[in-house]
Amino acid sequence: MKVIQPNCRVQFAAEDIDFIVSVLGTRLGNAECLVKLLADEDSRDQILDDEALLHVLLERGGCLRVSTHFYFYILVRNVFRRADIKDRAVADYVAEVLAEFASTKRMRCIVPGQANVLDYFFEMLAALQTADDRTSFQIRVHIGNHSLFLSGVFHERIRFRAEKKGFPDLKYYEGLGRSQYRAASDHRLSHRYELTNILSTLSDRFDATRRALNEISDRLFSLGDGGESMERLLITKQ
């Protein structure tokens, strides 16, 4: 399993540079000037917080030519700021989760030494009973990420299945994600990967984080008549 890192802000593709120049070029200069500005952390973060980038991303919809990492970071950072989740590293991490989980294969929990992929939470929780220290940390982080992803992006599906078929409801996902993020943040490896503050925040603010992602799914990805769903965009943005 891959330990996800908050790397969206340092993975600029050429098309991301072109997009920023096309939107903010009159203020920032040409691509060469922009690359120099993005190399400075403070300048980069101020540029990425410019709401003009968000507006153009939403207006152009399916005509975008930007990387998945850039796309999700701008959207997540915007809704997190409105939800009073101000730490850029937290937004960066969650954007990276969305970018990673856009591929169904990356959503799956693969435990070393086990022949079968773990697709269900009860399997992952059972695997914790015999996992070594490192694998235990990775499983807990994965459960937290997966819980946030499902309850953030597919909340309406979860609500429908809970009401109509007796499946676990959103409170189940919130409780599971919160507890596993907390356990992972207390693990020694969270310090090694510099994830302690991020995982702790996601545990403490799981409900607010989940609801912010609901806003992306409900509003930002349903624009105009018959707007695209988050599920479809996660597939097409790869």
Image (cartoon, grey):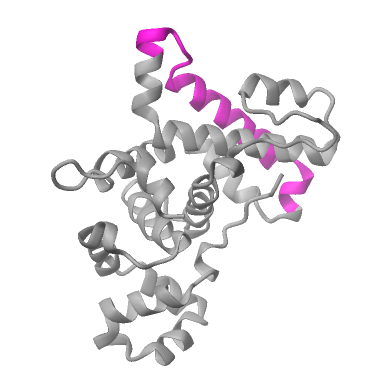
In the picture, measured across the screen, residue 131 lies left or right of residue 95, that is: right
Which residue lies at the image location 83% right of the left edge and 30% below the top edge?
Answer: 131
| Image point (62%, 33%), residue name | 143
Q: Is 182 in the magenta?
A: yes
- Magenta span: predominant SS is helix
User: In x, y percent, where is residue 180?
Assistant: 63, 31
- Nearer to the camera, 151 or 160: 160
**220 is higher (above) or lower (below) than 40:** above
Q: In which quarter of the image is residue 23?
A: bottom left
Q: In this view, does 146 lie above or below 190?
A: above
**Residue located at (64% from left, 38% from top):** 142
Examine the image and state in which quarter residue 108 appears: top right
Residue 85: image location, x then y, percent: 42, 49
Q: In this view, does 157 lie above or below 188?
A: above
Is residue 55 inside the magenta stretch? no
Locate the N terminus by quadrant: top right
Relative placement, left or right, of 199 versus 12 is right
Q: How many marks do you count on the picture?
A: 0
Place of residue 153 in the rendered image (x, y in percent of width and height, measured from the top left): 40, 37
x and y percent of residue 105 in the render? 60, 42
Q: Is residue 93 above or below residue 67?
A: above
In front here: 42 or 108? Answer: 108
Tell me the quarter of the picture where residue 211 sits: top left
Span of residues in magenta = 162-191
Compared across the picture, whether 130 is left or right of 216 comes to right
